[in-house]
Amino acid sequence: MSTSSPDTADSVESLFLGRDFTEPRINLDGKVILITGGTGSFGMKLVETILAEYQPRKVIIFSRDELKQYEMAQRFSPVEHPCLRYFIGDVRDEARLDLAMRGVDVVVHAAALKHVPIAEYNPFECIKTNVIGAQNVVTAAIKRQVKHVCALSTDKAASPINLYGASKLASDKIFSAASAMGGQDGPVFSVVRYGNVVGSRGSVVPFFKKLIAEGADHLPITDERMTRFWITLQQGVNFVLSSLASAKGGETFVPKIPSMSTVDLAKSLAPQLPHKIIGIRPGEKLHEVMVPEDDARATLELSDRYIILPAHDPRHRDAWLEDGATPVPEGFSYASNSNPERLDARALHAMLQNRLTA
């Protein structure tokens, strides 16, 4: 890996907060953007960013939960922001997606069933949303001649061991193949894959903070060896906007982000509390992998990201090499336990503060 490990707390903090993924950046002025799963934490941050930085013609927030749409409309009012459209719909419904995509220029596909145990217990529902839903997005985007489509993935899609990860791997493959399906003038499809979002709903940080606030006498640790990648929500949004600008067709983009062990994270949040090992949960990995070793031969590297090219369609490889990308070494993998970029307590608190003030 080309990025060296930081030597001081200052350089750690600077690296992880300074790598904001703002370049290159797609121009959304005058565009019509559709966000599936738009009422989730990512969708809300993306809408906030678009309204602050661009003058879009229309932003369509597509999701199936009317309560979340109502609540989001209280924060982002269509009266104050006339470009906003709140569109009830489910990615399982191809006809509804087709209707929503009329005149759309850019699609960000964030809709998914993401809870690992729930997906294991409800496998058909997971497949309908994460796999059939991905197919429906692709079909509608090609039919409606959308220009750019970016799908959000997850580290769990790399060498998956649970149904959620397997369904997202299938989704990734669908979007990677879609550029070829769309033909010469079809949409440019791409995938963005990253790890845990600091402070997001369902992540361990708010869970630990809740226990600390309630006066817990210990913090539960599933396995003391466990490590995870970390990214802020704003960095995730920036990375999607950057990937939309640079995609040539079929790539999976992986940001270079820091790792931290769960034990170190717990110590950073509550140095005084002891830990209790409770055992790893079904379907949970010890470490996260975002670029598996088997994908190394199709992976290129830039200063702030990795680019996994579709193995069946490497036609853009030469163009990426001309843009300065370099092949990763044979046998390379990008995993949270071997990642040289590590968070310490100071950098973690800086990321948390950055999330709160961004």
Image (cartoon, rainbow, N blue to C red):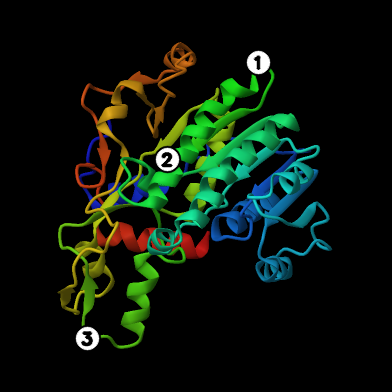
Q: CA distance from mark 1 to mark 2?
A: 25 Å
Q: Residues within 10 Å of mark 1 (few under 14, many from 20)?
A: few
30 relative to 294, above or below: below
Q: Which residue is mark 3?
A: 217
Q: Which residue sits at x=24%, y=62%?
A: 262
Q: Which residue is mark 1?
A: 184
60 relative to 68, above or below: above
Dividing the picture into quadrants, the one containing residue 307 is: top left
Amino acid type, residue under disc 1 in the picture: Gln
Left-right relation of 194 to 244? left
Marks 2,3: beta carbons within 8 A = no
Image location (x, y in percent) of residue 225: 15, 57
Q: Nearer the viewer, mark 2 or mark 3?
A: 2
Q: Earlier in the sequence, mark 3 or mark 1?
A: 1
Q: Residues within 10 Å of mark 2 (few under 14, many from 20)?
A: many
Left-right relation of 298 to 145? left
Amino acid type, residue under disc 3 in the picture: Asp
Q: CA distance from mark 2 to mark 3?
A: 39 Å
Residue sitting at the far bottom: 215
Q: Earlier in the sequence, mark 1 or mark 2?
A: 2
Q: Secondary structure at mark 1?
A: loop
Dividing the picture into quadrants, the one containing residue 86 is: bottom right
Amino acid type, residue under disc 2 in the picture: Leu
Q: Secondary structure at mark 3?
A: loop
Left-right relation of 147 to 132? right
